[in-house]
Amino acid sequence: MKKMSANAPDEFEKTLSYERFNRYLGWAGGDRQLAIELYTLNAKLSESLFTPLHMLEVALRNRIYTVLSESVHDHWFDEAEYQKGLRQAEQLAKAKADLAEENKDSAPDRVVAALTFGYWTAFFGADYEEVWRKNLHKIAQHPEGTPLRRKNFSSPLTPIRALRNRIAHHEPILAWNLPKHYGHIIELTEWLSPSAAEWSRNHSRFLDVYPVERVALHTSDNAADD
């Protein structure tokens, strides 16, 4: 990475805010140039993970919507039975309100696209155990034929959702075990749609961007395995 000119680091720190930059400065052991390099790597890794996260989110919401539409009806999300998760009813109401504000009707495809990743991942909470006992095999298949359970999704989806939100808000992710979560993202996508997983592998830059060895950070955050 090219070094910045003499005054550039000061301006760069002010632009980011000292509070934000101090996280990287701490990780770099006080080395300001290394802190900028870590910030740059964080941005590149965030960018590289957006592609597989994008595909997982699209595949997850479309598979859930399609299968439950076949089992119930195409407005199944309006039923109380499918609003058990924390904030799901609120998120649904907000999605519809946003559509109305844009002078768009609440057609199912529009509602589905307007709902957040958190709304969809909430479907794998314990409240939906019975739903997935009946329907999970229709939504996802393990390539080796091993039966899938709700917890096969809920366990990795919780940190994946948190990681996605950190990326969306430009927060640090270097202390996370990113190869582990990238692997889970691809695996879940594979269960939902092998072709979608293939697309993610072909177009994600994560494996090219992530260093051969995990990044060494100078603080206790280095031990994080989120």
Image (cartoon, rainbow, N blue to C red):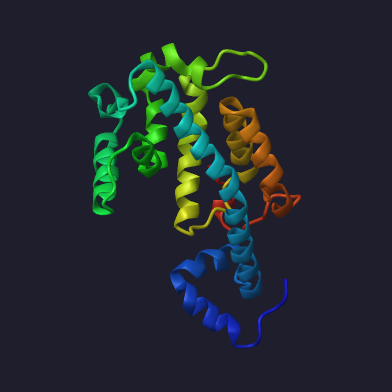
The residue at 56%/50% (across/down) is 50
- Residue 35 versus residue 14 in the image, above or below: above
The residue at 58%/80% (across/down) is 9
The residue at 44%/21% (across/down) is 67
Q: Position of residue 201 (x, y in %)?
A: 69, 40
Q: Is residue 218 visible?
A: no
Q: Position of residue 161 (x, y in %)?
A: 46, 41
Q: Position of residue 20 (x, y in %)?
A: 47, 67
Q: Which quadrant of the figure contains the N terminus?
A: bottom right
- Residue 118 versus residue 132 in the image, above or below: below
Horizontal side of 79 relative to 181 (left or right) equals left
Q: Is residue 17 visible?
A: yes
Horizontal side of 207 relative to 220 (left or right) equals right
Q: Quadrant of residue 118?
A: top left
- Residue 181 versus residue 38 in the image, above or below: above
The residue at 42%/17% (across/down) is 132
Q: Quadrant of residue 42?
A: bottom right
Horizontal side of 94 relative to 71 (left or right) equals left
- Residue 217 versus residue 31 in the image, above or below: above
